[in-house]
Image (cartoon, coloured by chain):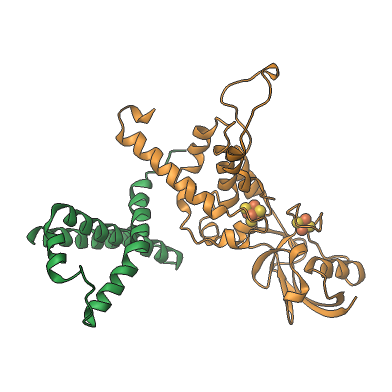
Chain colours: A green, B orange
Amino acid sequence: MAKSNKPIIWFPFAAGGTVIAFFIPVIVLLTLLAALGHVPAGLDYASMHALADSGLGKLLIFGVIALSLWSSAHRLRCTCYDFGLRADKLVANVLYLAAAAGSIAAAVYLLRI
Amino acid sequence: MKERLIQLEVMRYNPDTDTAAHFQRYEVSCPEEGVVLDALNKIKETIDPTLNYRWSCHMAVCGSCGMMINGEPKLSCHAFLREYAGVIRVEPLAHFPIERDLVTAPDDFIEKLKRVKPYLIPKEPKPISAGEYLQTPAQLKRYHQYTLCINCMLCYAACPEYGLTPKFIGPAAIALAHRYNQDSRDGGRDERQEIIASAEGVWECTFVGACSEVCPAHVDPASALQQVKIASSIDWFKEHLLPGGGK
Ligand code: SF4
Ligand code: FES
């Protein structure tokens, strides 16, 4: 029996799951606060812009977005399968392409900053 | 001892006469502190000697009395009557073929168990004169929890992935493979990886976690499977990205 190549999909999925668990709740909270007009000190527009302007900042933001998208796409694929949607290849292609498109868009926007 | 009138709805199937399984209702008086297995035993002794089910130890050790109780995989010797109100529905373990009444055929599980080589494969032959294998408490701790499995198959009955894809090697067998892979005396990991890192091995698992919820021995098979995924991913990157396959 051959070993599976699933790690290519699973490893970024697991990494994305960890990123989502750690970053997304904080990001949601901060965005909500900002929307309500309470921008925490150090997270104002100027400093966030400076972060997105630096190479390391771009990489960090891209990593969080791309891994989260990939992880969500894979999770959704598994959920579809578990709920009886057996067209797995089609579902996988649609979802992974959506994640890839989102990641490319994020990269393009980041590079234009 | 306070007695309570227990109503059980038990799935019956006789392969010689029945074309389909059906439910039969029984009423027995049992001590309040009894378990579902006590009620079944009382039915068999006093009402219906034709009722079939497996059990042996009556103390959650042998792993033979697993059934679906109100839809949940449970050891019937560990399912306390006081936790159930109304009619208790008893069915054979889900995802396994029914042999007769509450007896299922475990052949698929046993075949998978054999395939993962759940025994020590020493790294190199060691004569008895060379003395025993020594192990530190820390080395024991790495796998001890995974030795507690009683092969009751409740995790297979709980696992929706096994239900969907019967070729999935499944929680207990992979957890046992992991138990030996984690053992400092063992050298058989490569052989086991060929089985458990395949598509029908650990990668069928989507981390539903139901196996760990129902496991009566607190093995937490889901944690073993996650560890196997991480270790197998590291293997994969080593084999494909490092020169010489990381050997
Ligand atoms: S892992 Fe737990 S639930 Fe599964 S067979 Fe072993 S003891 Fe039973
Ligand atoms: S009878 Fe042995 S585990 Fe229940």
Q: Quadrant of residue A85?
A: bottom left
Residue at 58% x, 36% y is B183
- Viewer can see residue B168: no
Q: Residue furthest front?
A: A41
Q: Is residue A111 visible?
A: yes
Front residue of B185/A2: it is B185
Q: Residue furthest left?
A: A112
Q: Quadrant of residue B130?
A: top right
Q: Position of residue A75 (x, y in %)?
A: 38, 62
Of the 4 image quadrants, the one containing the N terminus of chain B is bottom right
Residue B86: x, y in percent? 74, 82
Query: Is B193 on the left-hand or right-hand side of B88?
Result: left
- Reply above or below: B29 against B122: below
Quadrant occupied by the C terminus of chain B:
top left
Ligand 1: quadrant of the figure: bottom right
Residue found at x 68% / y 21%? B131
Please report the residue visible at 64 percent of the width from the left and 68 percent of the height from the top: B72
Toward the viewer: B126 or B52?
B126
In the rendered image of this protein, does residue B226 appear above or below residue B93?
A: above
- In the figure, is residue B162 to the left or right of B61? left
User: Camera-side residue: B224 or A56?
Assistant: A56
Q: Is residue B7 left or right of residue B3?
A: left
Q: Position of residue B68 (x, y in %)?
A: 68, 66
In the rendered image, residue B118, in percent from the top left (x then y), is placed at 62, 39
Rendered image quadrant of residue B102? bottom right
In the rendered picture of this protein, how many numbered marks are placed on residues? 0
Q: Nearer the viewer, residue B14 or A113?
A: A113
